[in-house]
Image: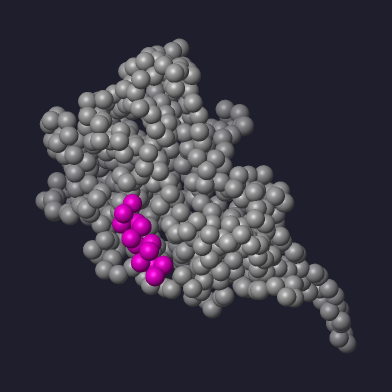
Amino acid sequence: ASKPGKETVDIIIVGAGAGGLVAAYEFINQGLNVRILEKTDDIMGCWKNCANATSHVAVSEATYRFPGADNEADLGDYPPRTQVLKNGHHFFERYNLDRITEFNAEVTAINDFPGISKLVASTKGQKGVVKYSHGHCEVTYTRGGKNKTLSCSGVFVATGAQCEQNHHIFPGEDTVFKGPTAYGSANDIGDIVNNIKGKNVVIVGGGAFAVENVRTMLMHGAKHVTLVHRSTLQVWPRSVHYLMSTEKDRPFRDYAEVYEKAANWAGFTIGENDSCQLAPLMHPTTKAQPTASDVFFAFGKLGLVTLVRGEICEMKKNSAVVNKNVGGTTEIKCDVFIKCIGWMEPGHMLKKFYPNFTHRNFVFLNSSPRIMFVCDPHYSYGTTMSDSEIKDRYAAILDTVPIGGTFSVLILARVMAWLHMYNLGNDVTRFNKMLTTLPPASSHPTCTWDEQKFSFPSNKELSDMIHFKIGTHKDLVASKHPTVWDFFIMSSAYLKRDIKAYATNTGNTVGEGIEKEFKNALCEAPMLQDIMSTKIDHAEEEVEVVEGY
């Protein structure tokens, strides 16, 4: 029940990024009255405000496809920023989402009002029954200098994982170092890219933007890139993402075989201790969300990228001094310095308009069925486990069979919208029972990979609904590339193009045929040997790489 006198809608979505838009689509399709509140004057959030002109989707196109997309077969894989923005605006216009969106509407407060339980009068021979109402939320926002409050049944917060960028000045960076610096995001690398040929680049960070900038700098002619990362790092070959989205009943242990083949081929050490360059697949000590890049491994094989575990302790005129996790300090040539040091915890933004936040179960805030916070999950917040506990935990992870493959925020948002509707459409006691099956409550507003929950043994109806939505997206991936060989034909074409760009901009012809070497190395993994019933030296097909990639 909403408060009299206030405008009322069914669902309020905070944020008009990709996740918020596809959630709105799901809610509207079920006949709900929806309002999107977006604090800026445009849609597509991080893709518009945080991505670079050289950014592209890290997962296969089918995993990042908007509902109802036309001519899917013609859509290139790993679409660039320009294509993602085009797809988002087309989706926005196609489903007339402008009629439910308020721009320049900054949310300042969310208030949650729980329902009231009451005893329904008993009838002859029956005991009284306790009934619960769901309650409501009130969302206050400013627009045009005026405050306004809406009442609703539920709030779907989709403010994104890249809200506020971290900033840091390293010792000597602004007083001694002579080269250009950037954060490697929001198009602040434009001038650097245009003048990168022959330069030695140092990149700090271990997330998706750091790996993206390795590719960008080398493709545009950098001489060498050193990636300095203080915590464990996971970069997956693209085929691992594909396999997780198409295979069934395979544990993470099988996918780890493919990952290890890629790392070994590239010459990267993989292991759990500080001296190793890459962490094992799905290892619990990793913090940054794994990303996917084939050319990262190819550049490693060619000796063009070096991984250093440690922290920058000083910037000199033409070098960076790194305090390594193991082995003391080292000085690295540096003409260009890129600081991919990530973003503030997404919950920092949430707490500004929902200061009453105390805890989260999966994506539900304060044990309420009414407020949901959905964005790209953290991989983890680190661990306080002992070495023996980490070992046992990792063994359990490797034996786990993933349900949904690797998600994009589009898939996650669509699935969570259905979970939201299910809980708001049923008696609140059913939600309370579901809470008892979720991972323990967390003080962090943003969910982690380990805290995601897509199967509910005590509620087959809910589990089947979620698995159907996930399966629909997995089917899109398999439909576009029916076999792993079809996928390799496509991914090899993209890798070949990346290497060709590097060769063109440097005059260095190394790397000829490296895409075939990489594919063959991956195919030595027992998992792929098991999947592929034919030899790996099939005739290749030409694949058109999407323009702008």
Q: Is residue 501 left or right of residue 9?
A: left
- Spot occupied by residue 24 in the image (x, y as percentages of width and height): 50, 68
The residue under the point 48% across, 37% down is 342
Residue 448 magenta-highlighted: no
Pick the front one: 534 or 83? 83
Q: Is residue 536 visible?
A: yes
Q: Is residue 157 visible?
A: no
- Spot occupied by residue 210 in the image (x, y as percentages of width and height): 39, 35
- Spot occupied by residue 325 in the image (x, y as percentages of width and height): 47, 19
Q: Is residue 354 left or right of residue 74?
A: right
- List the single residue furthest toward the top: 328
The residue under the point 54% across, 78% down is 31
Quarter of the picture holding the N terminus = bottom right
The residue under the point 43% across, 73% down is 96
Pick the front one: 71 or 176? 176
Q: Is residue 36 above or below residue 453?
A: below
- List the single residue furthest toward the front: 145
- Spot occupied by residue 285 in the image (x, y as percentages of width and height): 52, 33
Q: Is residue 242 above or below residue 329?
A: below
Colouring convention used in this rendered image of the protein:
one colour
Residue 90 magenta-highlighted: yes
Magenta stretch: dominant SS? helix
Q: Quadrant of residue 332?
A: top left
The residue under the point 29% across, 63% down is 479
Pick the front one: 206 or 255? 206
Q: Quadrant of residue 208?
A: top left
- How many circles with numbers are drawn on the protein? 0
Q: Which residues are magenta?
A: 81-93
Pick the front one: 385 or 253? 385
